[in-house]
Amino acid sequence: MNNRVAFIYSESFLNYKFGEEHPFNPKRLQMTVDLIRELRFLRDEQIVQPRHATLEELFRVHDPDFVHAVQHASTLAVDADPSAIGFGLGTEDTPIFPNMHEATSLIVGGTVLAAELVMSGTVDHALNLAGGLHHSRRKEASGFCVYNDIGAAIAYIKDRYNARVLYLDTDAHHGDGVQWMFYDDPDVLTISFHETGKYLYPGTGDIEERGDGRGYGYSLNIPLEPFTEDDSLLASLNSVLPHVFHKFKPDVVISQNGCDAHQYDPLTHLSATTRIYREIPKLVHELAHEVCDGRWVAVGGGGYDIWRVVPRAWTMLWAELSGQKLPDEVPQAWLDRWQSEAPVKLPGKFLDPIDLFPAIPRRAEIEEKNRITVRRAMLGTPFLL
Amino acid sequence: MLVEQAMTTDVICVTPETPIEEALAITTVNRIRHLPVVKDGELVGIISDRDLRNAMPSCLIEEECEVLKDTPVGSIMKTNVTTAHPLDFVEDAANILYQKRIGCLPVVSCGKVVGIITERDILHTLVEMMGVSSPTSRVEVQVPDRPGMLAEVADILRARQMNAASVMVFPSPTPGQKTIVLRLKTMDPRRFISDVENAGYKVVQPPALG
Ligand SMILES: [Zn+2]
Ligand SMILES: [Zn+2]
């Protein structure tokens, strides 16, 4: 494993912002980059400036009417366009903000660029932490996501390289937008591990969603029980991914690294610790080298405890991707810089202590249920046989 | 919701003269279970894939079965067909399917077959009505079983400018209580939940582990 890696970043990424009250806060990205820099884990030559996605790149996965609605909304100072509602814009989740089209296009362009750098062989791995807008649909903004950067990158890879793509989504919410975009495509395998949609948004991601037509079997969903902890989550990943990678033999893997499965996350009911944010990228990294000649594109995603979870989780992701060894301790200078702003105590170590949270009641039943879910999901996947 | 909004409109029909073998092929190719039988534009019977299969010889006997090519469906179809009207309510159609233990109703208007509504169409309607097909978070609220509770919850939604994809009201296992199940078009139902709790009601999302 060598060090040819790219970190796609621009301060302009911070313009993707729905307002002070909104849970999707770009400060999490700023804090993460600051932590990575504090560790001296980012060299200038690794940073690549994103570019805006072209309309053509957006139209590969989005309806032109929708893109035009976003462009139109972007010019308005306030939510003044009633027709926007039909496109999921101007809602509680995705309020309209000035220059929304430009801000989102830059994120999409960043992920397409990450894919370009990896596919052309310029780098082995590339990371766009601003990306991961996995809920956005063909004709609708949804769940804090305007355009779908992942979908656009996959479509770009298919269009340009005719390659097979494995998309892995470990955000606590189902990766619905990306799944529906490639639901009938046997060359794009989408795998999502998420909290079951029984209560959690978007409600989809049942194991029976397996794809359609020629794409049947190429959508894989592992809906985990609420209150699932590290061991069960990691066991599920370990019993699915190696097998799937070796059978599907993708040319490239795109991983979405939402970090809202943590116990501290206010929007979900999973009970993970930061241990999974070390283990998941490690597993993906190994498999990318075993199966995909190392081609790995990583993006961010959800994560709503911006103080205690996101900066550590995504720093661990970058450390793994760039092959750098993380210290145990979060640097004191970084803690000092951000603690005064934080309403909660910032953790001093990257890995949460094992006894940070009390044991979940009914742990055995939850683990058993997850094992059954994994088995049933795998059994219904024809290409694995 | 009316039957005409839930039914399938491009109905594949046969005539009483259609041979059994051909009718069976039509059900297989189109992946459908029922064929209305129409003569001179009027519904005269219905035949299901099961009726057709029952008329087939055992698959263990290997012989050309001329009789299947010659026998018309008219000789084995069910007559006295129960039908629905486009303006019937879907729930009434569902009730008839359930009570009569049948799988579909041809929809007849002015003497013509204009559609067909099957168990599957009804299940699909139900799924849509429950709001599962659009991205939503599910919240259950327990309220006392007395007038005005739904309006109270709706007021809280309106105050937050939140949209519900669906609302269902169920009797609660707790006596004197009712459960309102909402599918909210938001990824972040926290403010709604705290408003409802501040108003003194119990919210389930997801159930605590006991
Ligand atoms: Zn590597
Ligand atoms: Zn999420």
Image (cartoon, helix red, strand yellow):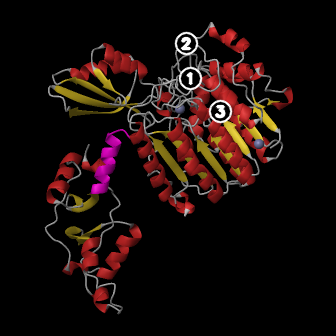
Q: Is residue B59 left or right of residue A272?
A: left
| Image: magenta residue range | B118-134
Q: Is residue B127 magenta?
A: yes
Furthest-front residue in this view: A355
Q: CB atoms at circles 1 and 2 under 8 Å apart?
A: no
In space, the residues marked 3 and 1 are separated at their CA atoms by 13 Å
Q: Tell which of A217 and A345 is nearer to you.
A: A345
Residue at mark 3 shares a chain with residue at mark 2? yes
Please determine whether, in this image, residue A43 is positioned above or below residue B71.
above
Residue occupying image coordinates x 68% and y 33%: A317
Q: Tell which of A161 and B104 is nearer to you.
A: A161
Report which residue position mark 1 lands on.
A24
Label 2 is found on which chain of the structure? A
Q: CB atoms at circles 3 and 2 under 8 Å apart?
A: no
Q: CB atoms at circles 3 and 1 under 8 Å apart?
A: no
Quadrant of residue A269 within the rendered picture: top left
> Which label's residue is closer to the chain start, 3 or 1?
1
Please determine whether, in this image, residue B13 is positioned above or below residue B115.
below
Q: Which mark is residue A131?
A: 3
Q: Tell which of A293 and B124 is nearer to you.
A: A293
Report which residue position mark 2 lands on.
A344
> Which label's residue is closer to the chain start, 3 or 2?
3
